[in-house]
Amino acid sequence: MFEKSVTPVAQRAAHPANHPAGISSDRTQAVTIRSVTTRKDRALFIKLPRLLYQGMASYTPPLDIEQRDLLDPGKAPIFRHASVQYFLAWRGARPVGRIAAIVDYVATAHWEERIGLFGALDAEADESVIRALLDAARAWLRENGMVQMRGPVTLNCHGDSGVMITGQDEAPMIATPWHPLHLHRMMEQTGLKKEMDLLTFRLDLKQDYDFSSLFPQGFAPGTGRYEDISISRLSKRQIAAQGEVLRALYNDAWAGTYNFVPMQAHEMRTMIKALRPVLCPEHYVQIDQNGAPVAMALVVPNIFDLARDIGPHPSPLGWIKLAGRIMTHRCESARVILLGVSHLVRGTMLGALLPPLAISELLSRRNRLPYRYVELGWILETNTPMLNLVERFVAQPNKIHRIYSESLAGPPKN
């Protein structure tokens, strides 16, 4: 079992908000890093963020069951094609942080590079804890043949990505990780370098967004020169088959972009199974040309809206309330998690029309969906065409998450 003790170092005084009630700030004991090997430690690993961050302004813990779907080896699909090692940081008998080290064999094969991943990084406001956790991930990735480390991702590039840089005061959103301000600052103090920012934009559905200026005069799918273009919705009866269409289109649309890894069939099946209870036909837009899919968008209801008064581990009555709210689609917000255009039309005039067409189609359904706002994310900071489109309606991102990287070549860091 991996176990490493780290002698405490002098720390600058942290902001009081980084020390929520119930979390001791005593740093006289050494930090010990231990591999997670038991079911009990794995359960602690999954719920640790809410123990560390409880009492912090704007923090809302996600449902424990949602986190188990992400992190439990018996549930998360990544364990079918990756090696994952969890670590916990301790001060005596008190857990003070966690991290995952990941070798995703689909990713390394696709990238043709030995890039290991780290994720699920959460810790109290103590640089020595964060440094020790990152050192443990580095050492494990080196031992497994990796020459570069990238992250955070939980636990792969299709899941929660990046550490939150801005947006801590925003309302919580599904599949969007929350971190206190101290985390990214202390990560950078350990030497991690920014690789990419992921931007999220909030569209207020109380406003009327005029997309007409983005289309040619007289543009109407299914008519005239665009008679070969059609728009369809999600069919719950054929959701499994449409999931495979969605996977193929997703892999096509994002191929060649930063940090992209082809989604596997079992990953899509797991995602569809998780989302099926909350999806309705209005949540999915598929755009076809001559019957072949060329663009799509998928919006997912924000489960935080339904569970805000239920808590992370609902009682039996809480589960009944949650089920009723899911069935009646009582979410007030949602997130567009997938938006892409096939390479077959990318770079063409039609390809330029498809993203605004997909978004405008989603927004046209607002009368049948109860949302006050939707969030568009992630958008890479280098995706100029998409940023030019979104920034016509929203000037600034409401959330920024950051991916870091570091070379693992050379001797281990002290």
Image (tube, rainbow, N blue to C red):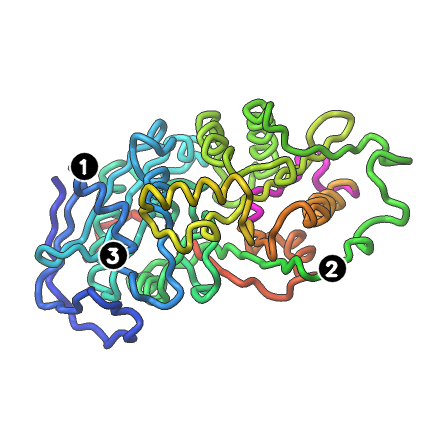
* Observer able to see residue 118: no
* Residue 300: mark: none
Q: Is residue 25 above or below residue 293?
A: below
* Image location of residue 159, percent across then percent down: 43, 43
User: Nearest the camera: 345 or 191?
Assistant: 345
In the image, which residues are magenta? 335-349
Q: Quadrant of residue 66?
A: top left
Kind of element beneath mark 2: loop
User: Nearest the camera: 188 or 182?
Assistant: 182
Considering only order in the chain, which callout, 1 or 3, is on the residue closer to the N terminus? 1
Q: Identity of the amino acid at label 2?
A: Asp
Q: Identity of the amino acid at label 3?
A: Leu
Identified at 73% across, 41% down, the residue is 351
Q: CA distance from mark 2 to mark 3?
A: 41 Å
Kind of element beneath mark 3: helix
Q: Identity of the amino acid at label 1?
A: Arg
* Image location of residue 149, percent across then percent down: 34, 47
Which residue is most to the front? Answer: 317
Identified at 11% across, 47% down, the residue is 3
Q: Is residue 1 left or right of residue 404?
A: left
Q: CA distance from mark 1 to mark 2?
A: 51 Å
* Residue 39: mark: 1
Report which residue position mark 2 lands on. 208
Q: Is residue 99 left or right of residue 285?
A: left
Report which residue position mark 3 lands on. 51
Considering only order in the chain, which callout, 2 or 1, is on the residue closer to the N terminus? 1
User: Nearest the camera: 314 or 25?
Assistant: 314
* Observer able to see residue 195: yes
* Image location of residue 183, percent across then percent down: 33, 62
Check disc 2: other Cα within 10 Å, few if <14, some if 14-19, many if 20+. Answer: few
* Image location of residue 335, percent across then percent down: 55, 49
